[in-house]
Amino acid sequence: MTVKIWLGSLDELNAWDEPVFWTPESEQNPHLLISGASGSGKTETLKVICEELNRQNIPLLIFDFHDDFLGFGSNIVNEDKIRIHPLQILVGEKPKDVVYKVSSIIRHTFNGITDVQEGTLREAMRLFYTDSGIDDLNRPLATETPLLPFSQFKYYIEMTSSEQRTMNSLKIKLDILFDYELFQASGDAVNFDSLLSSSTVFQLKNAPSDDVKQIVADLMINKLIQYSYRLEKTNTVRLYCILDEAHRMTYKGSPIDTLFREARKYGIGVILASQRAIDFNETLLANAGTIITLKQNLVKDAGYIAKNKWADKQVLLNARPGCGFIKRSSENRAKQIQVVPLGERAKNQI
């Protein structure tokens, strides 16, 4: 079945009130980017899309930082229900690759980690894997391999650091990870197969800091990428990964970058939302099949959007909540739209 999402209606002079649909499989990519300032209707637009995807039985994987999307998940994941091992290696992954990916995630999460400290992290991970019984870090894992508890990783930082200052600084930065209950695991408890059969929400509102929220999302997206490589390639959407307030996770080379480039082949779509369109880097923009822009508060941001021909500058600066533009890869120009909010959809259902 083709996914067809009713967003609302056109808000243009010659086509006023015509229904507007987003059909991701008709675009060059199923991925969607949404930008809109506070009060623009950005989060409500995301909720509309989640509701429509749920109605069409498309499983969702949502990273929820503010408890906005709990109603869309049949499986709610939080520190009370699950444990994650940040250094876990999936079947088919090379331990060597996990070393580089996880150390990069940690460096981009915690400000001030130096090249030397990242090198210490990598060496500590290699030793940690060796002591967990993994002899060859270059060989993909053929079976699930239990690891030492993550809580012991801090001792490996001590063992591999040749400088006391480096060790102390790293341990201080990472203390919050060792103290957070979600990471107190000897192995992963996330069943990735289940993600394709029901909607899952990672409830991160109560995480102790924004750094922890980011690293949980980055680690799980990185694992999702590795899991997707084991799936058969398909042109049919089998899962949508959804992330609001994505600005901290769009750094160059991030797991989100890789997911945008690779996920389409395996039937995984991605929806990212952020207050500012400039938060989306070139990799994300190049791989997005659809861009929705809502009200902007800054002239600079509205100008950037208009320059890229995603919207009209003055309309964006004066837009009402839910009003904005949709630019599809299958169309030559952006079209002005009014998103119908959840509370009004029952009486206007298409």
Image (cartoon, rainbow, N blue to C red):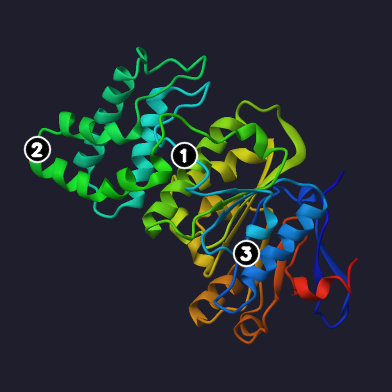
Q: Residue 272 location in percent, x, y?
A: 59, 57
Residue at 21 percent of width and 41 percent of height: 117
Identity, as a three-letter code, of the amino acid under mark 2: Glu
Q: Residue lying at the far bottom in this picture: please name it.
A: 318
Question: According to the image, label 1 marks what residue?
Answer: 83
Specify the label residue 163 is tagged with. 2
Tell me if 116 is positioned left or right of 256 in this view: left
Rendered-image quadrant of the N terminus: top right
| Of the pair 329 and 187, the residue shown nearer to us | 187
| Of the pair 14 and 100, the residue shown nearer to us | 100
Instruction: Describe the element under mark 2 as helix, strand or loop.
Output: loop
Q: Residue 210 location in percent, x, y?
A: 40, 59
The CA distance from mark 3 to mark 1 is: 31 Å
Whether residue 301 is visible: yes
Identity, as a three-letter code, of the amino acid under mark 1: Arg
Would you identify the image quadrant in which residue 148 lies? top left
Q: Residue 149 location in percent, x, y?
A: 35, 30
